Amino acid sequence: MITSIELSLYPLGEASIGPIIDEFIGVLEGADLTVTMGQMSTIVTGDSSKLFTALEKAYTMVAEKYGIVLVCKISNACPV
């Protein structure tokens, strides 16, 4: 099933958040998914099993090193 997720990652207590967000997005980009970055959020689209596997990997990777908040909206019905 094709699924889209809109993600906003907020690293907490860090002087520079860009590299942390880039690290997170890099995992998603390497997972055969369509990644569209915006100013306030990123939309990731693809097969739901690949998408959720990549999301878990990206989340775990940054959450093990930093305090973060990750906001997600998930849909199987939004236009892609």
Image (cartoon, helix red, strand yellow):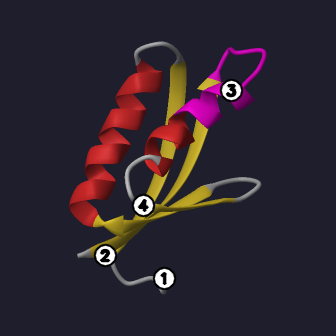
Closer to the chain start, of discs 1 and 4, is 4
At label 1, which amino acid type do we have? Answer: Val
Residue denoted by label 2: 2
Closer to the chain start, of discs 3 and 1, is 3
Quarter location, residue 45: bottom left
Is label 2 in contact with label 4 (beta carbons under 8 Å)? no
Instruction: Report the residue at 70% width, 15% height from top.
Output: 14
Per the image, label 4 sits on a secondary structure element best described as loop
Gap between marks 1 and 4, in whole Å? 12 Å
Residue denoted by label 1: 80
Is label 3 in contact with label 4 (beta carbons under 8 Å)? no
Instruction: Report the residue at 33% width, 35% height from top.
Output: 57
Magenta-highlighted residues: 12-23
Is label 1 in contact with label 4 (beta carbons under 8 Å)? no
Per the image, label 3 sits on a secondary structure element best described as helix
| Left or right: 72, with 21 as reference point | left
Per the image, label 2 sits on a secondary structure element best described as strand
